[in-house]
Structure formats: structure tokens, C-alpha cells
Image: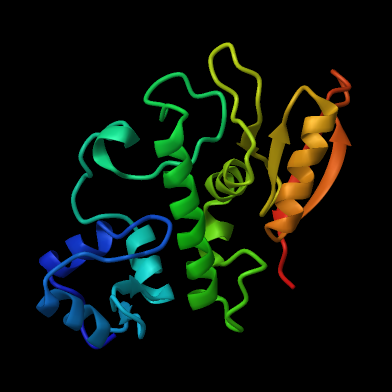
Amino acid sequence: MTRPPTAAQRRVVDAADPVTGRLKGTEAQLAALVKRGLAFRHPRPPHDHFLTPAGHRLREAGPTAPPPPPAPADRTGVFTARIGGEEEDVPKPGPARVREVRSAWQGLLELRRMTNPDGATDRPCGWERTHLVQAAALALEAGGHRPEGPGSPGYRVRATPQPEAVAVHLPDTEALRACAATLEEAGWQVGEHTEPRTRARYLLASPRRA
């Protein structure tokens, strides 16, 4: 990167899709970000621009100005992975949500292909390792599992004190093991554990490295 991006270019970086890193901006802004090593132009049509690993690091360092208040995903068009247990601003289930999840998962696979050194899509990429809860939740929802909602049992994905590990909770043991199989297929290492006090079973999942 030859010099810091301008405020306008930084806004383009901050507004990148949180999953795929896809950029929207003027041709001049996108070309300047490519020149600075923060973006690249996809070789296949429609030749969209995406953040490079350096661009992702810049974006994750924080925006230059406070972001606007979050709005429900179904009004903004911004995809949000469901981690389970949400009570407000939750996307409604249905065909539209299925399409959003499918599109987000395909975008994540493309991000793996573009950012993993060997182009592998069968194991998590750097973005997933810095967004563990959202990445695991997306893999589960894309695999057809239902997140926990008001009055509706389902999975809950939560952060843990362990590095690069999330916990997946689900009261039904059979459904919990189905979640384990989905995560393993998505490139995660999964182990089943028991809570010492409640004796409830849960999963501990980490992104596979090789």
C-alpha cells in the first residue's frame, strides 16, 4: 500500500459486504483501492471488486466515523447470521430467508476460494476465524438447521473463553449431533461435551486448519 486511502475510499472499504468483502463504489475509487493493495478485481464476469486480506484488516480496524444505527436485515438488505436466542430484529423464516442464507453461504465459499492460500473451499478462511460465532451460525443455517427463537427450540451459537472455539447448544441430542455433522462437513472440528453442573450436552467447534 503506497499511501493511506482517502476518506471516500475508506468509506467504500467500511461499507464492504461483511461476508464476501464485495465492494461498491465508483470505478475511480475501486481502481485506487486495487492500486493500494486493498482490493482486487475478479477475473470472471461481472468483474466485481473484493477486499484483499489487507483490505479486510483495514475494515476490521474500525470505520473512520461512527456507523449508523443497525436496522433489521429484511429492510436494509444486509445479511445477518442468526446465532439463536435473538428476540428483536430477527429475519422472518420463509423462502426469502432461504435465498439470503444460500447466497451468503455461496459468497463465503467464494471468499474461501479467494483468500485461502491454496484456494481451498472445504475449510474456513481468515474471515471466519475472526467472526467465529457468525461463521458457525451461517454454516448451521445454510445446512438447514433452525436457530432458537421465541417459543421455538433450536441451536444457539455462543463464544467461549477458548481461542478459535464456539459452543453450540441444543436440547435435543439427536439434533445436536446433526449440527455436528453439518459443521464437520463445512470444515470445522467438532467435539461433544457435557456441562458439569447441568449434564446438558453441547458442541465445541473450531475452524479446521488443514
Tell whether 158 sits left or right of 51.
Answer: right
Identify which residue, 35 or 58, lies in the foreground: 35
Residue 194: quarter of image: top right
Q: Quadrant of the C terminus?
A: bottom right
Residue under the image location 86 percent in, 19 percent down: 197
Identify which residue, 188 or 167, lies in the foreground: 188
Residue under the image location 43 percent in, 74 percent down: 53
Residue under the image location 69 percent in, 49 percent down: 165
Tell whether 67 sits left or right of 101.
Answer: left
Q: Which residue appears farthest toward the front when viewing the image?
A: 95
In the image, residue 107 above or below residue 137: below
Total count of labels? 0
Q: Which residue appears farthest toward the top when viewing the image?
A: 151
Q: In x, y percent, where is residue 12?
A: 20, 63
Coloration of the structure image: rainbow
Q: In x, y percent, where is residue 136?
A: 61, 47
Q: In x, y percent, where is residue 171?
A: 77, 22
In the image, residue 50 above or below residue 62: below
Residue 54: quarter of image: bottom left
In the image, residue 20 above or below residue 139: below
Identify which residue, 100 or 76, lies in the foreground: 100
Q: Quadrant of the N terminus?
A: bottom left
In the image, residue 48 above or below residue 191: below
Q: In x, y percent, where is residue 172?
A: 80, 24
Tell whether 100 sits left or right of 174.
Answer: left
Residue 3: quarter of image: bottom left
Residue under the image location 49 percent in, 69 percent down: 110
